[in-house]
Image: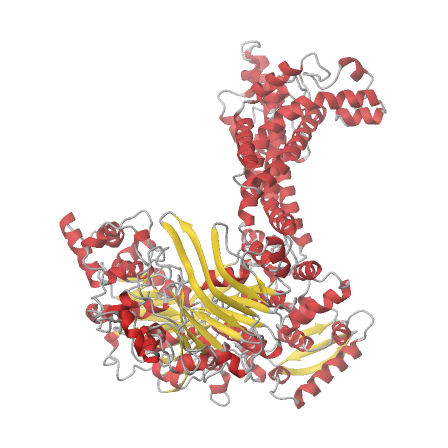
């Protein structure tokens, strides 16, 4: 009858162990997909520019002359030591790319998430609470519109509307103000704070606004729908009726009982959206000339640098696993039923 | 589990002289030591590593003989395994042990492909008629489905004729009125009739009916039961009637098997089981049924507690924690100690409760199953001597109060050891299903032969 | 429904306490595509302190709607008419705010399905805290805890489980918690809607026992809604039998079970399968569609003793010597033969043999 509650520690340990096979499967997939591509990375990137011997030499250096299985083991070994390889075209370490450009991606993701939660949460909760009201109908149209509008369209629209105003429409920072900011965390606004340059902080935040809104609006539609549906469902819940029958005040019924339960599944969606944003903000980064990992990845894809692509994709895969694990932990913290 | 179910007993009832002539060829199905264990959900890691995660013993060593033309009732509460057993008889669940002999074959060993042709002769009727009919299939298609699956008709004409015939058999007349209807057009009773039509259309010999009337309204239940009796008579059917409703089982069944947590605790001809219930569980069940007779009232001495978690069944006899007549070797263990304390605390004033609760340091550990020796850690600020004295006082008090608390009979020694209190219990013994009189078998130590 | 001249003195004569709740001519209906469904159609009853009234009937007879309607807990789109007099206040038409204040400390509800009735994210203790904080603001934290533990203890839930989450309890224990949660506020009137239908046989008996004890230990007036006549017999003082939105018979439970007056009560008792059942009996046909209920007595199409007049004239309610009230022409004519005129010429002839009712009409 009574299941042991409070087994959170054990649950976390279990979940961590379970992540191992998951990561392994993902890495294997990434590795195989890269090999399925026609030709090998070296000739793809440098084919036609180099002679056969030079190509063979390059292949040897990259370890591409070894048997497939050995390459696979090398790859796994490298990943374990957090060595994601060195790009072929410009000899940058993939880990450096992640560190240097990751900061920008992270800022943009968090900015977008902030926007999405700020707009989506209240609208979704209200829509669900006052279902089929004028507000709800408007909110749903808004949600669908933002979801359907392509990023470059929203982005361009924003740029058109704000070009020449106080809001910057491109780049991560003003080139002049950013000159004397030392990159410590590679998250620009944080670096500015560390440098104690308040002008630069303000400038950085300003630059974040339009890209964050553009990207945030993209997911706000999903958010509104998701929260709204969950609120409607939990308002029909048996425990809601029971709470009303005990004379619990309507405001408390809605907030404490309906909203809280409605938000549990939203956490999962939220986390997965973050994972998507981290890897999929490419269009926004391009539109706003944002120096994130996504746009860097595109550059390497265009140059057919498979080693770079493999490295970056590997990191993305790991981040997704990490985030999905975090979601589970958060869920276990709020929902006592998750722990066993 | 230290004790192993002992099921080799010759517990099958003798053929009753009334029903059938008692010859061997009257046996339709013979179930021997059947086990259906399900892996636990939850522990995904345990599943990967292949250890740790326990199994739910939904059916745990069941012996049954099903005779042609009889109605066998599998009666029990939730978690008794009655539904799983019923489904396993048709191969809808896989047995993890034992055998089901039918038509010269062992159903537990047949592959899904070899089972399929047999399914024509073995049909199932489910509890919820609404859920067992596909809402987008009209009655013509739904009822005739088995004919198509088993390729029993040559052409559409024959198909129509057979479907119409089946519908009329179950009282859906005239059949033309129902052929093109959809389940949503029918009432609950009519749906269950359509389900019965589908079950009999392929001319089965065995029908497993899982709570076929419990979702129906009072005034329809009798009608469906009557229909099932008519069908049985006209089509020479054999029924396995799975239910929690003893009243309908008493009326409907020839033989009864009372199940509790995956095992049969009492088995025999319905009349005898109902007239003279022997197992304490059967007695309790019969006493607990609310009867529409205002001169009778609910018994005061209902078994305490509820059906335990099937994943962690009690030691020994599964019913012992709730049984007022339990004996020392029925399987007393640490969980019973915890239950005893919690029951006692119900009647205490808050301050008294707080005082006694503080004595026990590891109450949660007492919730897990364990061997017949348990270490009780004293709460902070208390010594093992305090706890021991407390237990002794409880035992003393219990010996003076009625009704007798059977728990203490199962405790052999209580002593101090290294700052803890050691409580040792009598070694558990699993009761075997043994014949008590004629054809009634009971799995209870109260009825075991002396010295068994 | 008009009550005939027979004076309704049964209650007054015994000097019983004032009823806690008096329902008069209550109607509850809700709209569907096919028209309004009159789920409860002119129902009158009362409950006194410490008394348990069993409300029985088949599914769709309106018993659950009636239970919710009395507490004003009907879903949106439901209309109510009539009087629900609770200690002098008419609950029909009361503002939601006012009703909310009464629900809990005055009016309680116990549900059918205990598994889903507790908020899965809240501990048992939080449920009690919430209820007590809402309605009894004067209590200290310690007092609230004591009240809650007291209520739980009464229902057999050990205090050591106070801080557990709902999912850690079995169905029977959750129902006990739900009952404790309703009783902790000491309401004067409680509706229990099929409280044991989802539970096992032995647990059902335990809960019935708890409900039966309730009337002895508290002064709570209880309406127990069930389809199980056995439960009424064991736990109720009085019983009201519902058919198609009407109460067709009500009175002392022993009396009604021993001498059922209305043909529907008789047929329902006969068709119930119990341990003493030796033959199967059933009521032909099915309960009527409440969008277009039959004229006259609503039971006449299925009634084995229906008369011609029953099909046209609604039977008046009569109070019999035993205090039982029933709405059937047979009893009405016996009480007051002059009523026969109302039935018209040949109104007392048997209704042309309850027309062959086929499976086509069955429930």
Q: How many marks?
A: 0
| C35 and C62: which is toward the camera | C35
Q: Is residue A73 above or below residue B258?
A: above
Q: Position of residue A164 (x, y in %)?
A: 70, 11
Query: Is residue A106 found left or right of C276 in the rendered image?
Result: right
Q: Is residue B314 visible?
A: no
Occupied quadrant, residue C173: bottom right
Q: Is residue B273 left or right of residue C191?
A: left
Q: Which residue corresponds to the image point at 76% horizontal and 14% vertical from the top-left?
A: A175
Residue at 29% x, 83% y: name it: B16
Colour scheme employed for the rendering of this structure = secondary structure
Q: Is residue B430 left or right of residue C343?
A: right
- In the depicted structure, whether residue B185 falls above or below residue A271: below
Residue sitting nearer the eye, A268 or A322: A268
C330 with respect to C72 (left or right) = left
The location of residue A333, given as percent across then percent down, is 67, 49
Q: Nearer the viewer, residue A52 or B185?
A: B185
Q: Residue at x 32, y 67 (%)?
A: C299
Q: Quadrant of the C terminus of chain A?
A: bottom right
Considering the image in quadrants, where does the N terminus of chain A appear? bottom right
């Amino acid at each position: 009858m009574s299941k042991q509650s409070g087994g959170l520690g054990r649950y976390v340990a279990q979940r961590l162990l379970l992540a191992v096979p998951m990561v392994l499967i993902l890495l294997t997939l990434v590795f195989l997909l890269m090999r399925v591509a026609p030709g090998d990375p070296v000739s793809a990137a440098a084919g036609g520019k180099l002679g056969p011997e030079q190509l063979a030499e390059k292949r040897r250096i990259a370890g591409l002359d070894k048997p497939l299985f050995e390459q696979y083991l090398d790859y796994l070994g490298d990943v374990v030591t957090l060595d994601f390889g060195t790009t072929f075209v410009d000899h940058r370490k993939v880990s450096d790319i992640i560190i240097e450009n990751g900061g920008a991606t992270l800022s943009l993701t968090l900015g977008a998430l902030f926007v999405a939660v700020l707009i989506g949460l209240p609208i979704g909760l209200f829509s669900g609470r006052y279902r089929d009201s004028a507000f709800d109908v408007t909110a749903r149209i808004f949600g669908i519109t933002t979801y359907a509008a392509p990023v470059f369209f929203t982005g361009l629209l924003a740029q058109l509307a704000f070009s020449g105003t106080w809001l910057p429409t491109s780049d991560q920072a003003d080139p002049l103000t950013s000159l004397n900011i030392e990159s410590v965390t590679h998250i620009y606004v944080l670096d500015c704070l560390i440098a104690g340059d308040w002008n630069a902080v303000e400038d950085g935040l300003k630059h974040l606004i339009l890209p964050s809104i553009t990207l945030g609006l993209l997911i706000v539609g999903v958010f509104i729908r998701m929260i709204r549906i969950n609120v409607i469902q939990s308002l029909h819940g048996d425990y809601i009726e029971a709470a009303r029958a005990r004379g619990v005040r309507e405001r408390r019924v809605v907030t404490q009982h309906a909203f809280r339960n409605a938000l549990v599944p939203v956490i999962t969606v939220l986390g997965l959206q973050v994972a998507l944003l981290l890897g999929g903000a490419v269009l926004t980064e391009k539109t706003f000339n944002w120096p994130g990992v996504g746009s860097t990845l595109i550059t390497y894809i265009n140059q057919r640098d498979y080693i770079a692509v493999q490295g970056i994709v590997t990191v993305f895969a790991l981040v997704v696993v990490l985030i999905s694990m975090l979601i589970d932990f958060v869920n276990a913290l709020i929902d006592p039923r998750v722990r066993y | 589990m230290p004790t192993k179910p002992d099921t080799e007993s010759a517990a099958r009832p003798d053929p009753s002289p009334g029903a059938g002539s008692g010859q061997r060829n009257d046996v339709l199905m013979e179930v021997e030591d059947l086990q259906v264990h399900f892996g636990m959900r939850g522990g995904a890691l345990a599943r990967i590593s292949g250890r740790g995660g326990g199994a739910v013993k939904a059916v745990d060593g069941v012996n049954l003989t099903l005779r042609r033309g009889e109605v066998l009732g599998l009666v029990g509460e939730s978690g008794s395994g009655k539904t799983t057993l019923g489904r396993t008889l048709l191969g809808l669940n896989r047995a993890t042990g034992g055998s089901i002999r039918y038509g010269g074959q062992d159903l537990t060993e047949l592959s899904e492909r070899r089972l399929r042709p047999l399914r024509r002769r073995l049909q199932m009727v489910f509890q919820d008629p609404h859920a067992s009919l596909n809402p987008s299939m009209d009655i013509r298609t739904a009822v005739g489905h088995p004919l198509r699956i088993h390729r029993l008709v040559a052409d559409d004409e024959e198909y129509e004729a057979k479907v119409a015939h089946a519908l009329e058999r179950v009282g859906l007349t005239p059949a033309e009125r129902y052929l093109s209807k959809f389940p949503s057009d029918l009432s609950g009773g009519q749906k269950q009739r359509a389900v019965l039509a589908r079950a009999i259309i392929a001319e089965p010999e065995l029908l497993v009916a899982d709570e076929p009337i419990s979702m129906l309204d009072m005034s329809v239940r009798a009608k469906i039961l009557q229909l099932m009796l008519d069908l049985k008579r006209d089509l020479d059917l054999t029924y396995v009637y799975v239910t929690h409703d003893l009243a309908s089982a008493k009326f409907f069944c020839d033989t009864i098997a009372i199940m509790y947590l995956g095992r049969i605790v009492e088995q025999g001809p319905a009349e005898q089981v109902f007239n003279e219930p022997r197992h304490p569980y059967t007695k309790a069940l019969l006493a607990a049924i609310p009867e529409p007779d205002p001169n009778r009232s609910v018994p005061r001495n209902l078994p305490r507690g509820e059906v335990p978690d099937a994943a962690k069944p009690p030691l020994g006899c599964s019913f012992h924690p709730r049984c007022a007549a339990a004996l020392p070797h029925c399987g007393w263990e640490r969980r019973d100690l915890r239950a005893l304390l919690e029951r006692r605390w119900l009647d205490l004033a808050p301050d008294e409760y707080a005082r006694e609760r503080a004595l026990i340091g590891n109450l949660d550990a007492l919730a897990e199953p364990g061997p017949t020796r348990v270490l009780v850690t004293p709460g902070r600020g208390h010594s093992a001597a305090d706890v021991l004295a407390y237990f002794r006082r409880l035992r003393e008090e219990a010996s003076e109060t009625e009704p007798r608390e059977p728990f203490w009979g199962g405790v052999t020694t209580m002593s101090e050891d290294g700052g803890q209190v050691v409580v040792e219990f009598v070694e558990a013994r699993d009761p075997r299903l043994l014949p008590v009189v004629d054809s009634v078998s009971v799995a209870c130590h109260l009825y075991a032969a002396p010295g068994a | 429904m008009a009550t005939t001249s027979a004076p309704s003195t049964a209650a007054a004569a015994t000097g019983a306490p004032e009823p806690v709740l008096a329902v008069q001519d209550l109607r509850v209906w809700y709209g569907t595509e096919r028209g309004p469904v009159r789920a409860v159609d002119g129902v009158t009853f009362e409950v006194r302190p410490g008394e348990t009234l069993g409300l029985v009937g088949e599914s769709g007879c309106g018993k659950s709607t009636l239970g919710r309607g009395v507490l004003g807990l009907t879903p949106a789109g439901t209309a109510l008419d009539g009087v629900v007099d609770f200690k002098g206040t008419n609950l029909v038409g009361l503002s939601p705010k006012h009703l909310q204040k009464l629900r809990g400390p005055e009016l309680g509800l116990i549900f059918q399905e205990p598994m889903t009735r507790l908020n899965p994210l809240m501990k048992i203790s939080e449920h009690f805290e919430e209820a007590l904080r809402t309605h009894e603001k004067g209590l200290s934290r310690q007092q609230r805890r004591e009240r809650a533990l007291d209520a739980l203890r009464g229902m057999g839930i050990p205090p050591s489980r106070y801080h557990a989450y709902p999912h850690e309890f079995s169905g029977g224990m959750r129902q006990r918690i739900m009952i404790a949660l309703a009783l902790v506020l000491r309401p004067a009137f409680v509706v229990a809607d099929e409280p044991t239908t989802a539970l096992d046989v032995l647990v059902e008996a335990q809960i019935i026992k708890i409900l039966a004890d309730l009337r002895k230990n508290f002064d709570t007036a209880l309406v127990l809604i069930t389809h199980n006549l056995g439960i009424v017999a064991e736990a109720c003082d009085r019983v009201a039998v519902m058919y198609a939105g009407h109460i067709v018979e009500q009175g002392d439970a022993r009396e009604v079970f021993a001498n059922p007056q209305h043909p529907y009560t008789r047929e329902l008792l006969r068709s119930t399968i119990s341990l003493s059942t030796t033959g199967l009996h059933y009521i032909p046909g099915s309960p009527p569609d409440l969008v277009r209920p039959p004229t006259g007595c609503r039971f006449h199409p299925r009634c084995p003793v229906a008369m011609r007049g029953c099909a046209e004239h609604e039977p008046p309610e009569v109070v019999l010597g035993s205090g039982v009230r029933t709405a059937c022409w047979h009893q009405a004519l016996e009480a007051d033969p002059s009523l026969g005129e109302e039935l018209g010429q040949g109104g007392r002839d048997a209704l042309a043999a309850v027309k062959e009712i086929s499976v086509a009409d069955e429930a």
